[in-house]
């Protein structure tokens, strides 16, 4: 949980400091970061597939298989990152064709042309982090994330505002800081694995292609990536629709999305722990342990959701105001829009927690294809159309767009938990 929150806080730092810099920069990074996040999520399936596969291999006493799938996860994620880099480089005309403001789209492209280079170290770091998490070496993951967060904050501050003799680069400074942060994190993971898992020889003869391990990873990873893309696509679509409403709405949306995503990282960390535990129990065919893991993980996640709801409802102006410069003339209007959106964000805390928990528990059972179909239907065929209908046809604007998010996540949570309960009953 700590490592997920700390790693995501690197991106939150970008949003926070660019909000202090200017509202335009905040809108630009909201759009650019959303595109980058979708690319990252699409590739992340190759990392998240490693988690249950390594956990199962180690539970079966087969460390060689754990090493093989991790290596091929690195191979596959490298190829996927290369394929996605080109559209990020030419993002401006694509975003303008999707109805985004030309100035905002140009700034988003400037951000992506630098931050996109961080996609490789970020995804490699995620693969290695999944490997270490499956081995239950989570302490190093946390401390690396915290260290990188601190470094990123200082570099961000210096490059965005031009302090300590460095040039004032604004949006591009935030992108450079993110690339540095992701690279340092990857270097830390490599050094740790080389020292503490030297016998695994993770990077020896790295160029050797392993066809069977590649196919095994791809079979599990592609549905995971499609599932993750379906969810991230729901939020990306909401950002694009908010962009149609205007720069102020997009800026407010970006702030609230950061706050909602920060609370989501807690559930993500818990869900990954659930994937490891369920993967181990699945290898032993211990269905009682599977049920206990699901109950414990969902219980803890519900507590975290309740805490987030309390702060979202009790302190919306404080939370949103932290992202805005005190003397900015647009601050009152962004606070007004953002406060309403944060109330709506509190509405999906429980269902968002439930859907990611069910997804991760199903990954532990190595069930990814049906969950993929469930998420595509819930988010793309239900959530996004409802957002558009309520936001533009019924003219509820931002409120309607966010209500579509609530509905899509709620339906996904219901169907995914039904799938999980069906599997554990049928396999006993």
Image (cartoon, rainbow, N blue to C red):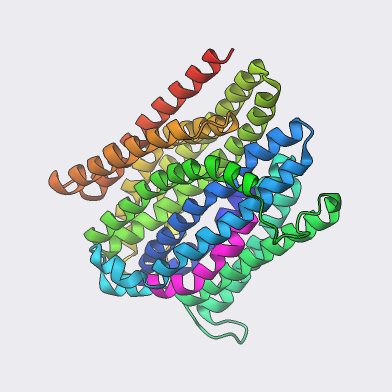
**Looking at the image, residue 278 lies above or below residue 404:** above
Residue 26 percent coordinates (x, y): 40, 66
Q: Nearer the viewer, residue 210 or 179?
A: 210
- Quadrant housing the N terminus: top right
**Residue 112 colored in magenta in the image:** yes
Q: Tally the marks.
A: 0
Residue 253 lies in what quarter of the image?
Answer: bottom left
**Looking at the image, residue 95 lies above or below residue 173:** above
Residue 57 percent coordinates (x, y): 72, 35
Residue 427 percent coordinates (x, y): 56, 15
Q: Nearer the viewer, residue 313 or 118?
A: 118
Q: Is residue 264 visible?
A: yes
Magenta segment range?
108-126
**Looking at the image, residue 391 lies above or below residue 162:** above
Residue at image location 37% in from the left, 63% down from the top: 31
Q: Nearer the viewer, residue 89 or 171?
A: 89
Please tell me whether the stretch drawn in magenta is mainly helix, strand or loop. helix
Q: Residue furthest front?
A: 211
Residue 188 lies in what quarter of the image?
Answer: bottom right
Judged left or right of residue 90, residue 266 is right
Residue at image location 72% in from the left, 60% down from the top: 206
Judged left or right of residue 67, residue 156 is left
Q: Is residue 328 visible?
A: no
Residue at image location 36% in from the left, 39% down from the top: 376
Q: Nearer the viewer, residue 30 or 74?
A: 74
Residue at image location 73% in from the left, 57% down from the top: 189
- Quadrant housing the C terminus: top right
Judged left or right of residue 163, residue 207 is right
Residue 200 percent coordinates (x, y): 81, 49
**Residue 134 colored in magenta in the image:** no
Residue 351 lies in what quarter of the image?
Answer: top left
């Amino acid at each position: 949980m700590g490592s997920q929150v700390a790693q995501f806080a690197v991106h939150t730092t970008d949003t926070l400091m660019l909000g202090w810099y200017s509202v335009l920069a905040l809108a630009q990074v909201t759009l650019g970061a959303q595109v980058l996040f979708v690319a990252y999520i699409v590739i992340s399936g190759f990392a998240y597939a490693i988690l249950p596969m390594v956990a199962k291999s180690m539970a079966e006493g087969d460390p060689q298989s754990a090493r093989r799938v991790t290596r091929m996860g690195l191979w596959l994620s490298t190829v996927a990152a290369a394929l996605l880099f080109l559209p990020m480089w030419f993002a401006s005309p694509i975003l303008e064709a999707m109805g985004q403001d030309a100035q905002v789209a140009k700034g988003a492209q400037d951000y992506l042309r630098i931050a996109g280079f961080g996609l490789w170290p970020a995804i490699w770091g995620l693969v290695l982090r999944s490997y270490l998490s499956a081995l239950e070496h989570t302490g190093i993951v946390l401390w690396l994330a915290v260290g990188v967060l601190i470094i990123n904050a200082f570099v961000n501050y210096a490059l965005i505002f031009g302090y300590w003799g460095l040039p004032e680069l604004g949006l591009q400074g935030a992108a450079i800081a993110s690339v540095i942060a992701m690279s340092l994190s990857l270097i830390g993971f490599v050094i740790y694995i080389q020292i503490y898992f030297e016998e695994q020889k993770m990077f020896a003869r790295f160029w050797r292609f392993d066809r069977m391990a590649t196919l095994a990873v791809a079979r599990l990873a592609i549905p995971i990536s499609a599932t993750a893309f379906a969810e991230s696509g729901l939020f990306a679509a909401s950002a694009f629709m908010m962009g149609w409403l205007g720069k102020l709405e997009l800026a407010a949306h970006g702030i609230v999305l950061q706050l909602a995503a920060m609370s989501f990282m807690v559930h993500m960390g818990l869900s990954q722990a659930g994937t490891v535990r369920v993967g181990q129990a699945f290898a032993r065919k211990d269905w009682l342990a599977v049920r206990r893991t699901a109950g414990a993980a969902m219980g803890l996640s519900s507590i975290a959701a309740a805490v987030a709801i309390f702060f979202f409802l009790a302190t919306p102006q404080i939370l949103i105001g932290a992202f805005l410069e005190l003397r900015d003339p647009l601050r009152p209007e962004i606070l007004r829009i953002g406060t309403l959106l944060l109330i709506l964000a509190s509405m999906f805390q429980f269902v968002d927690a439930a859907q990611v928990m069910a997804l991760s528990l199903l990954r532990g059972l190595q069930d990814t294809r049906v969950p993929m179909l469930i998420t595509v239907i819930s988010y793309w065929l239900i959530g996004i159309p409802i957002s558009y209908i309520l936001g533009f046809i019924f003219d509820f604007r931002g409120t309607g767009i966010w209500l579509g998010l609530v509905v899509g996540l709620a339906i996904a949570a219901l169907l995914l938990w039904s799938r999980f309960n069906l599997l554990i009953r049928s396999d006993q």
